[in-house]
Image (spheres, grey):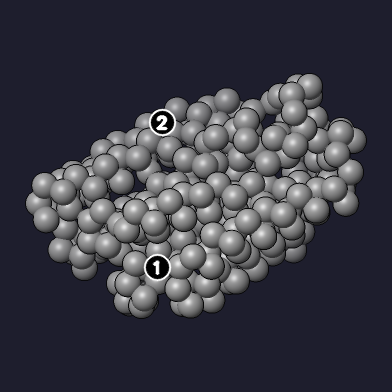
């Protein structure tokens, strides 16, 4: 399962852009918001302009690289799933070796970007690359591949603190954990779309592991995520605007739970997409809180 926000599509558009999911921006949004959370908390307000540019460009490049390596890992099974059979690799539009060359080029671009930061951030970047490379293969060996995705998604948090502060304060790990838990929750909704196909072809996921308790466990994970963000707010001495944004996020989570009562594929996809708004309102809360309340 790749968090690309991919609905059924037909071939015909540029296969290279589709391989990098440039036609599916939801994954960018879901990676952008926690990255901005981390930068704003690390800077205690607006981050350094150069770091902001580096991290936004970096997440675009690394998200593309992650999609490419995911499709390379899944090239033999994507053709068996209705939603993914028209992807460039199973459709034969791009050769696997060419996909690897593209991935290498994207990683080189990411390296050039991170070299503009400091030694600690550069060191952490190698961990991010390792997690991104390992995650696509986790679904072969564990029903918890979403944990790997969550760690990859949250890796921008310590990197953001390293870039802004040159240090890793202990409180950042609360934010890191919140992003991991949130990612597991929203990617489980995404995995529910393909659950029947995944069972048949032997792909593992939290949607399969959770079974009929899927929505309940997602709701619990979302409550834990909100609880962690409350602790983050306390640790960083945030004000009422930040905490109000968490109330709005809770409303979005409730709506996700409500619309997926029948577990219809489109409803699960809509619930997954709705997490873009969750990330956005939390970021607005963080940014406005620092701007107006200091």
Judge from the rendering whether residue 257 lies leftward or rightward of residue 192; answer left or right. Answer: left
Label 2 to label 1, Cα distance in Å?
40 Å
Residue at the spot 16% in from the left edge and 58% down from the top edge? 238
Q: Position of residue 7 (x, y in %)?
A: 64, 28
The label nearer to you, 2 versus 1, is 1
Q: Which quadrant does the C terminus fall into?
A: bottom left
Verify CB contact (< 8 Å) between mark 2 and mark 1.
no
Q: Which mark is residue 206?
A: none
User: Residue 285 is drawn in which quadrant?
Assistant: top left
- Res. 262 in view: no
Judge from the rendering whether residue 222 lies leftward or rightward of residue 131; answer left or right. Answer: left
- The crowding category of the residue bearing disc 1, from other C-alpha atoms within 10 Å (few below 14, some 14 to 19, many at least 20), is many
Residue at the spot 81% in from the left edge and 35% down from the top edge? 88
Residue at the spot 80% in from the left edge and 30% down from the top edge? 86
- Is residue 280 or residue 112 the one in the foreground? 112
SS for callout 2 = helix
Q: Position of residue 265 (x, y in %)?
A: 61, 28
Judge from the rendering whether residue 267 lies leftward or rightward of residue 19; answer left or right. Answer: left
Extreme-left residue of the structure: 293
Q: How many marks?
A: 2
Q: Position of residue 49 (x, y in %)?
A: 34, 54
163 versus 97 height, above or below: below
Q: Position of residue 280 (x, y in %)?
A: 35, 40
- Is residue 140 or residue 288 the one in the foreground? 288
Judge from the rendering whether residue 106 lies leftward or rightward of residue 99; answer left or right. Answer: left
270 versus 40 height, above or below: above
> What residue did someone put label 2 on?
258
Earlier residue among tags 2 and 1: 1
- Is residue 230 or residue 217 the one in the foreground? 230
- The crowding category of the residue bearing disc 2, from other C-alpha atoms within 10 Å (few below 14, some 14 to 19, many at least 20), is few
> What residue did someone put label 1 on?
163
């Amino acid at each position: 399962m790749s968090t690309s926000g991919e609905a059924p599509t037909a071939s015909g558009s540029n296969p290279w852009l589709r391989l990098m999911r440039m036609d599916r921006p939801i994954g960018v949004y879901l990676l952008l918001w926690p990255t901005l959370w981390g930068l704003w908390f690390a800077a205690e307000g607006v981050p350094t302009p150069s770091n902001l540019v580096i991290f936004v460009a970096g997440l675009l490049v690394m998200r593309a690289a992650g999609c490419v390596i995911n499709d390379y890992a899944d090239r033999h099974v994507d053709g068996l799933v209705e939603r993914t059979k028209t992807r460039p690799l199973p459709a034969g539009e791009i050769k696997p070796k060419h996909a690897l060359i593209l991935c290498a080029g994207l990683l080189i671009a990411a390296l050039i970007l991170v070299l503009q930061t400091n030694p600690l951030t550069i060191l952490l970047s190698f961990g991010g690359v390792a997690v991104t490379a390992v995650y696509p293969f986790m679904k072969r060996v564990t029903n918890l591949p979403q944990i790997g995705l969550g760690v990859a998604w949250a890796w921008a948090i310590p990197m953001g603190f390293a870039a802004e502060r040159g240090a890793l304060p202990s409180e950042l790990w609360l934010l890191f954990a919140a992003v991991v838990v949130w990612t597991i929750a929203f990617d489980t909704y995404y995995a529910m779309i393909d659950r029947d196909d995944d069972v048949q072809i032997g792909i593992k996921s939290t949607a399969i592991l959770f079974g009929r308790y899927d929505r309940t466990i997602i709701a619990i994970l979302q409550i834990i995520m909100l609880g962690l963000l409350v602790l983050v707010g306390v640790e960083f001495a945030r004000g009422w605007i930040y905490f109000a944004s968490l109330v709005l996020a809770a409303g979005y989570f409730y709506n996700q739970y409500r619309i997926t009562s029948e577990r219809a594929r489109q409803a699960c996809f809509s619930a997954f997409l709705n997490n873009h708004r969750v990330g956005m309102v939390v970021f607005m809360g963080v940014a406005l809180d620092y701007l107006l309340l200091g």
